[in-house]
Amino acid sequence: MPLVSAFRSLLLCYAQILFSGSVWVGLTLLCATLVMPIPAAMGILCASAALSTSFLLGLEPEERKSGGYGYNALLCGLGIGHSCALGLGSLLLALMCGVLCALLTAGLRASLGRVHLPLLSIPFILVYHMVLAIVPVAGLSAPYVEPTLEHGPALLRGLGALFFLPKAEVGALVLFALLLHSRISAMLAVTGFAVAYLIGVFGLSLSPETVVLVVSYNAAFAAVAIGGVWFVPSASSFLLGMLASAIATFLCAGLLPIHQRVSVPLLVVPFNATILLVLLALRQRVRDAHPKAVDLMLATPEDNLDYLRARLLRFGWSQPVKMQLPMRGAWICTQGVDGAHTHKERWRHAWDFEVLGPDGKTFRQDGTKPEHYHCFRLPVLAAAAGTVVKVEHDIPDNLVGSMNLKQNWGNLVLIHHAPGLYSLVAHLCQGSIKVRVGQVVQAGDVLGLCGSSGRSPQPHLHFHLQSTADVGAATLPCTFSDAVVAGENRQLVSTALTPKEQQIVRNLEPDEERGSFVASLSPGHGAEWVFQLGDREERVLCEVDVYGQPLLRSVTYGAVLRYVLSDEMYTAYDVSGPRRSVLYLLRTALPRMPLESSETLCWRDLLPGRLVRPQWLQLLHDFVAPIRAQDGVTVELSARRDGALLQVESQSLSARQSKDQDAPHPAAEPALRTRVLLARGLGVVRIEVTRHGRTVRAERITAPSPTEPTQKD
């Protein structure tokens, strides 16, 4: 309904002021401003004019619906309501300011977007200062009068001053809205206020009234923006947020005399200046870390933290480019990091690989000739896409037991993958190189054949990463993505493998059989699934976002699950929205699945703690989340096919099991068990998640019910 949609957009205008996208946060702030009905009505009128203007001009629909074109106008309207007497002139002024705010928002967003800077509340500052100049000229009211200080806690009055209402009851609602949106934001706001009060009152000798009415909200929300919105929450982001609070406080102290001379309020000028200054300054860092800038502007600081942890802790990549093992089939690691022979000191991060025969030896016959070795003249592959920068191909292969110490690396290929990232494969067979300098290669392309040139007493493949194009440069740490480690009774897929000596490793080997099941998880744009959860139904649509990535969206609850389906793996990423959605069950039960059908294959994943933790406990956990090194539950998954169905099961592991791939499963019931049934061509037909003995089940009701797979011990 149009009226419902318009009211929702209005509530999101309120929520945007606290960097939120929640209608409940917006409703709480609306109630806070209704303490003064006339200013609240002016704010609603001005915001409505801005939203209507953006609609009539055909500006970005999603930005309009989310309140992006209205929150600056809302602040202007609130200010007009406090600066002007109610009348035809003030109503017209509010309408015109709404139009002007919408136009300024569109124009400034385009300009600032080119340099990747946020809009913040710059339109409000520009338009409202113009309003204050018009008011005395038009005879609408007396010039701006600084509000009087009310009784109540200083923190609450300071938060209320953001809405021109330095009242404890207003501030209490603002603080509640912050807690509703994000516990991390609330902590940052309180800490930022404390920094401002200490510096302002005890350091700069400002009056408590000035700190509460002007400095407090500038400093508090500078801490929120820097500590949790533009940087991922952590101990370092909190420190940077406190620094932003201090900067905002000093800016307030310096700018106040200037504004007092012209009899206009300082408003949020220090907040905007502080945010832009910090963002511009930190762009000059050599490395984006401590604190880490957010990759995507997600819903809450908690979401930003989960997003980063999902990539660092879940996938564990130590380099910016995904690397695969540089060979086909299963090879054994004969020398790893800090190896006994040559992998020492600046060359410690390196690996040697060979191939075992059926008898467990690396060679056939007596092993006295290079061609006796199983790895000799097998293909060597590019570990990732890149450009070939150096090739050596004319060095003879050694006799077994002898080495060429003058040309240590032998025949080699050096590939540039990213700034400061090169990979080297060495000891290749003479005359086998199949690429040239300047050639662009893709992951898996054949570079040459395994040999025994250079410092190589027997045929083997040497691989390492380095930061420069100089052969022999110091090595870098490396992990191989989605590599398989062969154990006694199973094969375990590792998201980020650092091979150890005597481990038998290989890349995933996708096949059509598993791929046909997984392909049904991405049935195409517009496909619809309907699930039954107890006594309620939920509709789920398959869609594509603006970046071309697939997602599942709950029409019923608005939850969204983003995922990627590559040639080797299905991977579910972020899920957001109401937790009662079936998409949270799907994210928990099917976080990843390789496209390989080996019966002994299993894989592990790290589930974010919020997926398995009760919601009330998660709210408490949010207060300590930024300082925790890790938050999640490791699960081990396996799959088996039964006719037209594929059953994927998982169970949680203990801390000891998470570190040891060969550790036996516990006799006791795990805290978490899951089960998903996939039907070829239909996708997910059943999801079961059992936490501490309590099972939640979702059934598809828009597809024929396939035969249940038989239970096997």
Image (cartoon, grey):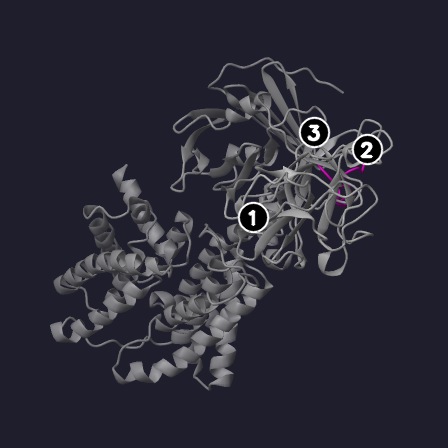
Q: With 532 as the anchor, is 497 left or right in this view?
A: right
294 or 475: nearer the eye? Answer: 475
The part of the chain drawn in magenta is 652-666
User: Which residue is disc 1 drawn over?
Assistant: 321
Query: Is 664 a magenta residue?
Result: yes
Q: Disc 1 vs disc 2: Cβ atoms closer than 8 Å? A: no
User: Which residue is disc 2 drawn over?
Assistant: 363
- For mark 1, does the 10 Å Cα neighbourhood hold few (<14), some (14 to 19), or many (20 or more) residues? some
Q: N-terminal of the two: label 1 or label 2?
A: 1
Q: What type is the residue that disc 2 sits on?
A: Phe
| Callout count | 3
Q: Disc 3 vs disc 2: Cβ atoms closer than 8 Å? A: no
Q: N-terminal of the two: label 1 or label 3?
A: 1
Figure quadrant of the C terminus: top right
Going 28% across and 60% down the picture, which residue do you hit?
A: 108
Mark 1 residue element: loop
Please name which of the two marks, 3 or 2, marks the residue nearer to the observer.
2
User: Which residue is disc 3 drawn over?
Assistant: 601
Q: What type is the residue that disc 1 sits on?
A: Val
Q: What type is the residue that disc 3 sits on?
A: Leu
The majority secondary structure of the magenta stretch comes to: loop
Find the distance from the CA under tag 1 to the CA under tag 3. 25 Å
Figure quadrant of the N terminus: top left
Residue 552 is situated, as x and y percent measured from the top left of the image, at 46, 34
Q: N-terminal of the two: label 3 or label 2?
A: 2
